[in-house]
Image (cartoon, rainbow, N blue to C red):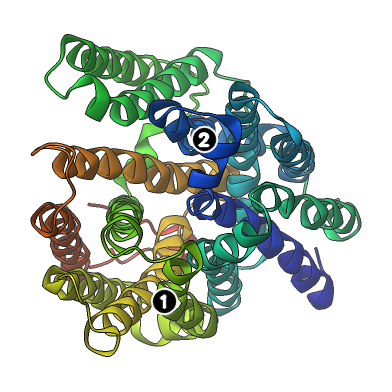
């Protein structure tokens, strides 16, 4: 795409879609009690309204990213966005719990292909450097804002009717699809060389689906149960077979050499920790505000508003900050702010202070997202060849989704370890899990300070890779 204005027009469409993808991850949460009441779902069935989306999204992201590289990013993006819109419509209209869960799964599959395709369109359209960093900061700001504001919108829409939380994305997705047909670069049909690695695709998709399924079901089945242990062993076996197959494939789904990039590995671990700890904290906060304090759905949603507003206002500047200070310093400060926010919430009691605890804690979490989300995306894609941008994007998004599922399952187990009665002590113990992860994130980000890029010959400078 050669025109400056057309590039930024395409970015606007991609931002609208990533906003919807992120919105859907969080927006259904506040509506769950109303969905359960209207459709007569059991508690165990209700979790699949959320988990069905995570299964489709987290399980197929790697396949989605590589498919975008192989079949053309524009084509994959348009088809997946259409699937997302149709699944959103079906989810808002069905009157059966099983059909709703199926629609949520299909919707997650659509997001698994749109998210990495959108990110790789940006990274192959905008040249590496300040312009790409600015584009990525805007793009990731929309994703972070969608996730943060999803709860607020959910609280407002649930007051009207829970179906609106599922139907709201439909017109936005349709408008984005029509606009994408006009503004996405038709010249962007360069494809990666090689054929489809069907064996690798089956193995990694099966392992990701089984991993997410296992960690979601583990609190109910028991972490030490034969079912859970057997499933984890099967996941390890599938991943081992995947690595074995990829090392011998002429055109692998995942070129394992990409993992020699230290910045990409740190970015993936950083997003796993950021999303995992925050998804878990959000679940704990919902239990605290609604079930223990008796707050309304809207009141609970508004408690998260300071973080969402802060992310929306500041995230677009992160590209400039990354140019000036570097991504490593930003992610270190972001991880420290994340830990500080969780630490503040260890002070919860039956009468929390809005000005002394809730708002300051949420603001720290908002600072963490603003400082971390865009720099992690920049880290993960800088230095990666164009024909592997979809792969890098898929790896990053997979880390975030799988991290959210795993840490949420751990926190759920902590909350129920002493029975079904919710208490301040169990809530604090669950928050400690997120706090410890955030501190680990500080340590991982700090390892980037020791990295020195190798000196390359002039003709190779454009392809310098930072390695572990």
What label does residue 307 carry, if any? 1
Give x and y (percent) for residue 346.
13, 68
Q: Residue 228: x percent and y percent?
A: 22, 17
Viewer-nearest residue: 154 or 210: 154
- Quadrant in which residue 355 is drawn: bottom left
Secondary structure category for the residue under label 1 = helix
Please report the residue visible at 72 percent of the width from the left and 53 percent of the height from the top. 169
Task: Give me the disc on residue 374.
Answer: none
Residue 448, given in percent of the width and then of the height, sits at 22, 66
Q: Bin the neighbour count of mark 2 within 10 Å (Cα to Cα): few under 14, some 14-19, many 20 and up.
A: many
Where does the N terminus fall, quadrant-wise?
Answer: bottom right
Percent from the top left, x then y, of residue 408?
A: 29, 44
Q: Earlier in the sequence, mark 2 or mark 1?
A: 2
Mark 2 lies on residue: 49
Question: Under tag 2, what secondary structure?
Answer: helix
Nearer the viewer's eye, disc 2 or disc 1?
2
**For the point 78% across and 52% down, which residue is it?**
173
Seen in the image, is 242 located left or right of residue 67?
left
Residue at 62 percent of width and 61 percent of height:
159
**Is residue 123 visible in the rendered structure shown here?**
no
Image vertical order of residue 231 relative to residue 361, above or below:
above
């Amino acid at each position: 795409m050669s025109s400056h204005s057309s590039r930024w027009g395409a970015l606007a469409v991609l931002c609208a879609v990533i906003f919807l993808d992120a919105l859907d991850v969080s927006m259904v949460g506040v509506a769950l009690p109303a969905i359960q009441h209207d459709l007569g779902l059991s508690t165990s069935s209700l979790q699949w309204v959320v988990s069905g989306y995570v299964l489709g999204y987290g399980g197929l992201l790697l396949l989605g990213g590589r498919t975008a590289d192989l079949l053309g990013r524009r084509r994959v993006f348009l088809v997946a966005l259409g699937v997302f819109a149709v699944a959103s419509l079906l989810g808002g209209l069905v009157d059966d719990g099983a059909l709703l869960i199926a629609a949520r799964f299909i919707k997650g599959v659509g997001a698994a292909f749109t998210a990495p395709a959108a990110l790789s369109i940006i990274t192959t359209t905008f040249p590496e450097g300040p312009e790409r960093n600015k584009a990525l900061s805007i793009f990731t700001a929309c994703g972070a804002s969608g996730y943060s504001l999803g709860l607020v919108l959910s609280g407002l829409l649930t007051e009207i009717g829970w179906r609106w939380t599922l139907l709201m994305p439909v017109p936005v997705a349709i408008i984005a699809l029509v606009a994408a047909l006009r503004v996405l670069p038709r010249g962007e049909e360069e494809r990666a060389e090689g054929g489809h690695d069907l064996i690798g695709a089956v193995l990694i998709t099966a392992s990701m689906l089984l991993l997410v399924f296992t960690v979601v079901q583990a609190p109910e089945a028991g972490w030490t149960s034969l079912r859970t242990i057997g499933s984890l062993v099967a996941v390890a076996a599938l991943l081992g077979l995947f690595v074995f197959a990829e090392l011998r494939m002429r055109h692998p789904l995942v070129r394992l050499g990409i993992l020699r990039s230290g910045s990409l590995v740190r970015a993936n671990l950083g997003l796993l920790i950021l999303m995992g700890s925050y998804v878990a904290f959000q679940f704990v906060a919902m239990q605290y505000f609604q079930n223990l304090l008796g707050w309304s759905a809207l009141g609970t949603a508004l408690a998260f508003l300071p973080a969402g507003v802060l992310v929306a206002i500041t995230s677009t500047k992160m590209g400039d900050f990354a140019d000036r200070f570097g991504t490593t310093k930003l992610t270190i400060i972001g991880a420290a702010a994340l830990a500080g926010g969780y630490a503040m919430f260890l002070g919860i009691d039956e009468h929390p202070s809005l000005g002394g605890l809730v708002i300051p804690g949420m603001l720290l979490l908002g600072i963490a997202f603003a400082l971390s989300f865009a720099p992690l995306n920049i880290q993960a894609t800088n230095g990666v060849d164009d024909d592997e941008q979809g792969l890098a994007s898929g790896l990053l998004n997979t880390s975030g989704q799988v991290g959210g599922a795993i840490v949420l399952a751990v926190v759920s187990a902590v909350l129920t370890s002493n029975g079904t009665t919710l208490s301040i002590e169990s809530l604090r113990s669950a928050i400690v899990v997120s706090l410890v992860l955030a501190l680990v994130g500080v340590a991982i980000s700090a390892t980037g300070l020791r990295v020195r890029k190798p000196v390359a010959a002039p003709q190779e400078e454009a392809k310098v890779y930072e390695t572990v």
